[in-house]
Amino acid sequence: MKKDHKKDRKSLDKKKRSSKDKSMKRTSEKSVSNKPALMVSHDKEPSRAPLNNPHHKTRLLLILAIIFILGIFITTLFYFDYYLIDFKEVNTSVIITRTGGGFNTNTWELNFGKAAPGAGGTKHFTVYSNVKARVAIKVTGKMNDFLSVSENNFIINPQERRQIDVDLNVPADTPLGLYQGKLQVFMYKTT
C-alpha cells in the first residue's frame, strides 16, 4: 500500500510539473508575439534617475551656465544700445474756472493758468540731444485726460532741436477746480 501511495504521489508531482511546463510554453508563445518583451537583467545595477547621475548634473549645470552667460550678453547689448541717457519731469497744472482767462509765463513748468470748461491752450518746449536718441513723453496725474503732445516716441539726431507742442483741451463737462500732473520726457540712446 505504501508503494501505491508513493506512485500516486509521483504521478501527482508529474502532473503538476507537466501543467507548469504547459503554462510556461503558453507564456513563452505569447511573448514571441509582435509585442516587445520585457527583459530583466539582474547582473546590472538599476539605472539612476537623471538628476542623480553625475554626468546629467554636469550637463545640466553647463547648459544653465551657457543660458545665464547668453542672457547677460544680450542684456548688455540691449543696455548699451538703448539705455536711458536723460530724464526730465515737469509739473503741469490748470485751474478750471467759469470765466477762464489768464496765463502763466514761467519756463520751469507747464502751467496753463486759468481755463473754462471746453477751452484750451498750447505751450511749447524744445528737445535737444548731443547723441542720436529715442524720445518718449508721458503725461501722468489728473492732467492726463487734458493734455496731448504733437510728437511722441520719435528719434532725434545729434545736435538736432525739436519743438514739441503741448495742447490743453478741457472737456466741456469738467468740474471746476485745480488739476495737476506731470509731463515726463525720457531720452534713450539708440543706434
Image (cartoon, rainbow, N blue to C red):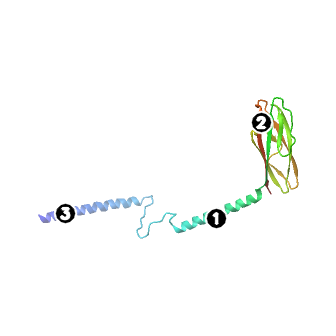
State yes or no: discs 1 and 2 in contact (Cβ < 8 Å): no
SS of the residue under disc 3: helix
| Dot 3 amino acid type | Arg
Among numbered discs 3 and 1, the one appearing first in the sequence:
3
Residue 64, how many percent across, how many down? 61, 63
Would you place residue 90 above or below residue 95 in this image?
A: below
- Apparent side of residue 73 relative to residue 100 in the rendered image (left or right): left
Would you place residue 40 above or below residue 107 in this image?
A: below
For image coordinates 23% across by 63% down, the residue present is 13
Residue 23, how many percent across, how many down? 32, 59
| Residue at the left extreme of this rendering | 1
| Dot 1 amino acid type | Ile
Pointer 3 residue: 9
Among numbered discs 3 and 2, the one appearing first in the sequence:
3
Q: CA distance from mark 3 to mark 2?
A: 112 Å
Q: Quarter of the image holding residue 106?
A: top right
**Quarter of the rendering occupied by the N terminus:** bottom left
Q: CA distance from mark 1 to mark 2?
A: 56 Å
| Dot 2 amino acid type | Leu
For image coordinates 74% across by 60% down, the residue present is 77
| Residue at the bottom extreme of this rendering | 43
SS of the residue under disc 1: helix
SS of the residue under disc 2: strand
Pointer 1 residue: 66
Pointer 2 residue: 178
State yes or no: discs 3 and 1 in contact (Cβ < 8 Å): no
